[in-house]
Amino acid sequence: MSWLKKFVIILAILVVMIPVAFAGIIYSKLKTMQVNGDFSILANNDYKYDNSITNILLIGSDARPGETVSRSDSMMILTVDGKHKSLKLTSLGRDTYVSIPNHGYEKLTHAYAYGEEKLLIETIENNFKLDIQNYAKVDFYTFIDIVDTLGGVEIDIQQSEIDEMNKFIKEAYSWDKKKNKGKIEYITESGKQHLKGYQALTYARIRKNDGTMQRDNRQRVLIEAILKKVESTSFTKYPELLDAVMPYVKTNMSPSDIMLLGKEVLSIGNFHINTMQFPLHPENEIRLPESGYVIPFEQYEVEFLHDFIFNNKKLDKQKLLDADKNWEASGKESQYAEDSEYTRYKSYGY
């Protein structure tokens, strides 16, 4: 629940945009992050891979303070594409119906609860047939501290989002441990708002109004707002940003890996992020008797994901529509054919 954006920020932001003048400071600070990482969880595989493209799994768990077991609240693949000189961010729906090794078919978010980063990465690689080279997990405290260190972010709040934000603001405010955080402030009007860290966190966590995929969209909006703010931030502020992030980051990347990645991002020349949501048909959500609401997908849809990540092709809705029709007409067996819960649903409609 803390998450991905925080991480994009630690990655694409804190490190990536750092001038040579700060290299020594940055490197020493990054070394404090490395000790939290697990360097053994990424196994070799034959899935889709390109040595000029780096895929980093960004993970944020939904654990509250004091909780030890949690699911992954946010899962995104940050792609640094040196071949096409672009940055990409793919949101993976937490309710995506996937095969989890040794656990059968369940929601993607459950993989983290069963086996943390190792099982989540294995699940993503197996189901989406792509290689994950790196990962990073962040704590929700990071998000609050980064936004506040930047002086807040500008977000356009919709009227329908106000009540949902205010329901959670008191709790998020209590997680802000800064002594100078001021009095709690609720959202009172729609339109462009200057949000503090705890307010921005509540915005990112709204889900009741319109589902998990729309929440993923809010998370991307926040990432872009944070990146925009960082671009306009003085270089002298970067060490302070690193101090806000490092204690809450767990990654398998070494300081030198991150510095090299930063150079790669700088060589791209801009910080525009192309985005995609997967599954491609969130409207196909179904309710299974045991698993609850899930979003199924078929393997032909994964080809569009690969085209986005590896070939830099944006989703062509007409091609997707044609692929949908071809799949339906083909009579091919669903990838869920061996899942009794799903087949019962398809047979009896419950």
Image (spheres, grey):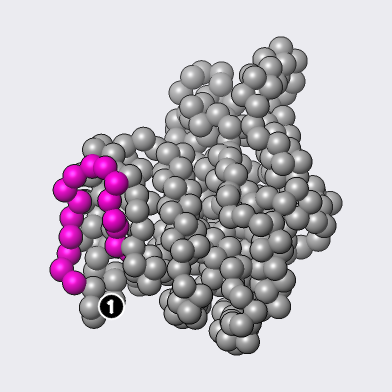
Left-right relation of 133 to 212: right
Residue positioned most to the top: 329
- What percent of the width, then of the height, locates residue 15? 59, 71
Of 202 and 11, the residue lying toward us:
11
Left-right relation of 48 to 37: right
| Crowd band around label 1 with a 10 angstrom C-alpha radius: few (<14), some (14–19), many (20+) | few
- What percent of the width, then of the height, locates residue 301? 67, 31
Question: Which range of residues does the magenta coloring cover?
Answer: 182-198
| Vertical arrangement, residue 143 with respect to residue 237, above or below | above
| Vertical arrangement, residue 190 with respect to residue 284, above or below | below
What residue appears at the point 71 percent right and 78 percent down from the top-left corner?
256
Is residue 195 a member of the stretch shown in magenta? yes
What residue appears at the point 69 percent right and 40 percent down from the top-left corner?
308
What residue appears at the point 46 percent right and 73 percent down from the top-left corner?
234
Of 11 and 264, the residue lying toward us:
264
- What percent of the width, then of the height, locates residue 341? 55, 32
Secondary structure beneath disc 1? loop
- What percent of the width, then of the height, locates residue 18? 59, 73
Left-right relation of 84 to 110: right
What residue appears at the point 54 percent right and 70 percent down from the top-left corner?
14
Is residue 108 a member of the stretch shown in magenta? no
Disc 1 designates what residue? 178
Residue 335 visible from this viewpoint: no
Q: Amino acid at mark 1?
A: Lys
| Vertical arrangement, residue 269 with respect to residue 35, above or below | above
Left-right relation of 50 to 274: right
